[in-house]
Amino acid sequence: MNKVWLIIQREFLIRVKKKSFLIATVVVPLIIPAVIGGLIYIMLKEAESAKPDTVMVVDESGQFNLDSTKNTKRFLFVPLQIPMEEAKKAYNETKDFALLYLPKFDINKPDGLVIYTQENPSIEKVGDLESILEERVRDLKLQEYKIDKEILKNLKTKINLKQINLTKTGEEKSSNSGILYGLGFALGIMIYIFVLIYGIQIMQGVIDEKTSKVVEVIVSSVKPFQLMLGKIIGIAAVGVLQFLIWIVLITFLSSGVLGYFGLKMPQKQAMEQMTKKIQDEDVKQAMDQQNGKVNELLNNLGEIPFTKIAFVFGFYFIGGYLLYGALFAAVGSAVESMQESQQFQFPITMPLLIGYLGLFMFILRDPHGSVSFWLSIIPLTSPVAMVGRIAFDVPTWQLVLSMALLVAGFILTTWIAGRIYRVGILMTGTKVNWKVMVKWFMMRE
């Protein structure tokens, strides 16, 4: 066991002392929010200074009335009283955004409306223009059916269900599916990315040592299985340290970086504008409603067991990493380059990918369904699936069963990988495939 500990120390210190570790751990978490903050700031500034797109309109129906009175912040409508063919020629001589053709149509089936553009427009702009036309057709229908617009507006009622979890003991706890969905989404993706990244690091480390012949010296004093176990745990410690540093940096420094790049400026402007309008009664009511929603959101956040979620995330982060790390180590011992490893990577990562896809297709849609249950129980998919479910208050017996099976899965994969590792780590110049790896696994010691 002392030899394994020495290998763990070696693997940990080698990677922590590298400049690449310092860059990835300290610089990257600062660069990412800074870049995002800068892009958002530029986007907001561009939106403030953007001029409305000019849209030429040929309205043969005479029902839309898209003249200068219908202009919006997004579009500037210019009606044309000329035939369509002449309008096309006139449009091509300009740099306007679009030419809109509105033929005579049935309001119950408004077909034949066409937009001509010189370049492929964004889906957002087309959608905004469609919304304006849909609103006008809706008004035409109200007029035909003699329905008062204000009465129809008053008929619309928005329902906001307050979610309460009722326990068997009768205790009531507030809940919010939107928050839980976002939490499960973020945790599941983080597990998938980190397990994949650090698993490949293990494989790369094994390949490097195998090709440099360093492993022949190490194996002379320790068993290959001990070497593999020490390497997996050592790199896992590096991953955990890096992850903890990222949490600290992102939590305490990201807001400062974003503020430095000017993201607070639009917020301040918005607050100043809101202050000027606060005299309006409708705005006051809206603000009161907004404050109520914020208070409800804070109450919902207070009910989430973040300590339990953090513990579960840490357990599945380490457990999933160790489980897949053993498999990646086995592949690294069998091949001599990253190119050769590609044929083995996909089958290994397939269960992890299934868990990732299942996160969106099953777990976040129905966290207590049968498919979600099995994905969170099977060790190869549980690291992603269970952290996606945990925010939805998973029954304790399911969580304990999943954890126990993950530990058993790690022991099993480590044993299987160890049998392959003990032979493959010393093999060079051998063309390796799945049949060869099975043969190495079946070999007696």
Image: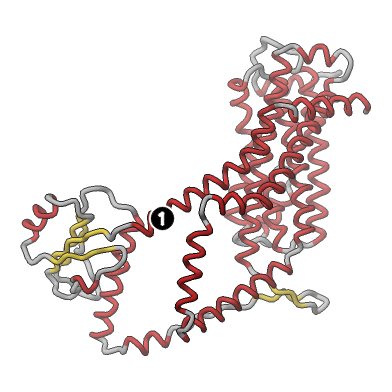
What is the tally of numbered marks visible in this picture? 1
Task: Return the residue nearer the eye: 414 or 164.
Answer: 164
Q: Note whether 337 is above or below 28 in the view shown.
A: above
Percent from the top left, x then y, of residue 111? 22, 66
Residue at the image position 83 percent from the left and 54 percent from the top: 400
Percent from the top left, x then y, of residue 37? 52, 50
State the image quarter where residue 16 is shown: top right
Task: Return the residue nearer the eye: 289 or 188.
Answer: 289
Task: Return the residue nearer the eye: 310 or 250.
Answer: 250
Amino acid type, mark 1: Lys
Percent from the top left, x then y, of residue 133? 27, 69
Q: Note whether 385 is above or below 320 in the view shown.
A: below
Residue at the image position 77 percent from the left and 42 percent from the top: 318
Q: Note whether 93 is above or below 274 in the view shown.
A: above
Q: Name the residue under label 1.
A: 45
State the image quarter where residue 331 is shown: top right
Q: Is mark 1 on a helix, strand or loop?
A: helix
Quarter of the figure with the N terminus: top right
Q: Dot 1, crowdedness within 10 Å: few (<14), some or many (≥20)? A: few
Residue at the image position 76 percent from the left and 20 percent from the top: 440
